[in-house]
């Protein structure tokens, strides 16, 4: 009788990948990064185990949004008080904090539980091309 392979957390081999966001569409890049963080690109993918790899996204300030999303899309946050809803339009967000826009897009595609939070800890987003992870020898991920 054959059994289905289930990965165990201590036997997962993690690699580092770097994704260059220059000229890439935000949603497509986020979907690819979420796939790597979940580990769906590996043959030993197990849904309830964090089998994903580390992802570094560079050039977050050069990522593009299609259509009229820069003027029509908003990032919402709430202070917790009545009337405390704050909205930031994406054209302002991409000028001031493009890393946050990319981070929110990627983490929104991960599971919304403790497993997804563990996966999000393996994500690093940088505005320019410089990053402090040269020692990990990240491989370039082609989209």
Image (spheres, grey):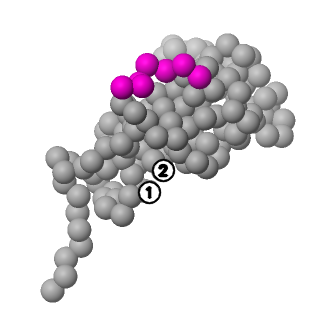
Instruction: Point out the residue furthest to the bottom here.
Output: 1
Q: Secondary structure at mark 1?
A: loop
In percent of width and height, residue 112 lies at 41, 42
Q: Main secondary structure of the magenta part?
A: loop
Q: Magenta stretch: give its range.
A: 129-135
Mark 2 crowdedness (10 Å alpha carbons): few <14, some 14-19, many ≥20: some
Q: Where on the picture, by quarter, is residue 8? A: bottom left
Mark 1 crowdedness (10 Å alpha carbons): few <14, some 14-19, many ≥20: some
Q: Which residue was labeled with disc 2? A: 35
Image height of 36 relative to 121, above or below? below
Q: CA distance from mark 1 to mark 2?
A: 7 Å
Q: Are marks 1 and 2 in contact (CB under 8 Å)?
A: yes
Question: Residue at the location (68% across, 19% down)?
Answer: 93
Q: Which mark is residue 41?
A: 1
Q: Secondary structure at mark 2?
A: helix
In percent of width and height, residue 35 lies at 48, 50
Q: Earlier in the sequence, mark 1 or mark 2?
A: 2
Mark 1 or 2, which is nearer the eye? 1
């Amino acid at each position: 009788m054959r059994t289905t392979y289930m990965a165990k957390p201590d036997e997962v081999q993690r690699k580092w990948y770097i994704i260059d966001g220059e000229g890439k569409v935000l949603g497509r890049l986020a979907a690819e990064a979420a796939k790597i963080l979940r580990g769906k690109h590996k043959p030993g993918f197990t849904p309830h185990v964090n089998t994903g790899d580390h992802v570094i996204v560079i050039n977050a300030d050069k990522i593009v949004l299609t259509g009229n999303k820069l003027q029509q899309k908003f990032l919402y946050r709430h202070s917790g008080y009545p009337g405390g809803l704050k909205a930031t339009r994406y054209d302002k967000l991409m000028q001031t904090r493009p890393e946050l826009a990319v981070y929110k897009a990627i983490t929104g595609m991960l599971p919304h539980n403790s497993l997804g939070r563990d996966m999000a800890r393996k994500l690093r987003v940088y505005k320019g091309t410089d990053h402090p992870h040269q020692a990990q020898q990240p491989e370039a991920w082609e989209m």
